[in-house]
Amino acid sequence: MTNLFVLLGFLIVAYFSGYRAENAISLYWEEHIGLPHPPHWFAAKASPLNLHQMTMFMKLIQENELASHLPSFCKQSNVACSTNALEKKTMDNTTLPPISQWNDLKLKYEGLPNETPLSVASQGGLPFFRESMVQEGSFMPVPDLRDPMSYKSFLPRPLSLKIPFFFARIEELKKLFGVVDESNMDEYIQDTLKKCEQSPNQGEQCTCATSAEDLIDFVVEKLGHHVNLWSTESIEGSYTNVTIGAMKLIYGNLSEPPALCHSQPFPFQVYYCHIIEKVKIYAVDLHVQKKVNHAIMACHYDTSTWNPNHLAFKLLGFGPGLIEVCHWINENGLVWTKTLG
């Protein structure tokens, strides 16, 4: 009976620790965002660390002693530290093929001749497409909508500021999280840091948010407190030829650009957020015999500053500035739009 009470006590502590973590994000949200509460899945990404744990790990990082406490740090922070961390919780739906490798080369096939479009089948779906291709009743091969590391949590802002989030310090960063050279995680870290440090296109404003507070601050700074938030409902329809159902333009003001925030593959939750001019946002129902998803689609109407070797142009057969380019918003992706009127 004593053991039962001890177990019950642990469960209560764990529950309320998680509740406090989610509540911390919710409180910051309510103080800055003119929406009643964040989506549950976003609030659930709050760090599970309490103040004592956060302070302890900050001290270990400062003293260069975190490596000797790495397993407990990884477990208590709910972050990915080892090369096999990607096996954890990435396959909620076992009917889908393995998660696609994240690689910026998917976005710019520089060695391919311009006249040779890539095989859609080899990509497992169509990652970029024209607006005219999405019409009610039409068919569309949907790519993998999953976040390859959807389970990871944010770090608390004070702790995230202690992380050397710079490509010049990548070896120090990899050592901190126990990442092996030439592993999947090594590639993910390199790609994310390169993306976060690349120069924005003309007219683009961007940031990499390493905490929930950073993300909220960016949105408020650029769009104000009164915003709407949109996200794709689920990963259903991934790798499937879907039928397009009801389609609705939910934001079409080309003079007030939205903010698009994409979850990045990294040991802890990081978002790449950017504001791009001349973007429309649609909500689209995806059907496979029945409705399986309510997906968000972004269409870019000014591609004049895009890389000529961008995968979109390889697939669609045009160049920068000649066409609009649309894509789905993946799992854990966020689209923020200014509330007008």
Image (spheres, grey):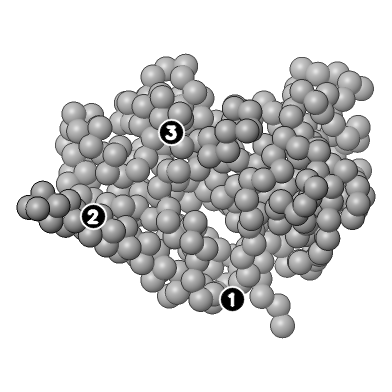
Question: How would you rate the neighbour count of disc 1 (Cα within 10 Å): few for under 14, some for 14-19, many for 20 or more?
Answer: some
Q: Earlier in the sequence, mark 2 or mark 1?
A: 2
Task: Classify residue 223 by image quadrant.
Answer: bottom right
Question: Is residue 310 found left or right of 105 in the rendered image?
Answer: right
Question: Is residue 315 found left or right of 159 in the rendered image?
Answer: right
Question: How would you rate the neighbour count of disc 2 (Cα within 10 Å): few for under 14, some for 14-19, many for 20 or more?
Answer: few
Task: Classify residue 114 by image quadrant.
Answer: top right
Residue at left 91%, top 32%?
Answer: 317
**Could you tell me which secondary element the residue under label 2 belongs to?**
helix
Name the amino acid type tagged 3.
Lys
Residue at left 49%, top 71%?
Answer: 37
Question: Is residue 262 found left or right of 150 in the rendered image?
Answer: right
The alpha-carbon separation of the residues under discs 3 and 2 comes to: 22 Å
Q: Residue 226 carries which label?
A: 1
Q: Nearer the viewer, mark 3 or mark 2?
A: 2
Q: Which of marks 3 and 2 is nearer the N terminus?
A: 2
The residue that label 2 is drawn on is: 11
**Could you tell me which secondary element the residue under label 3 belongs to?**
loop
**Could you tell me which secondary element the residue under label 1 belongs to?**
loop
The residue that label 3 is drawn on is: 88
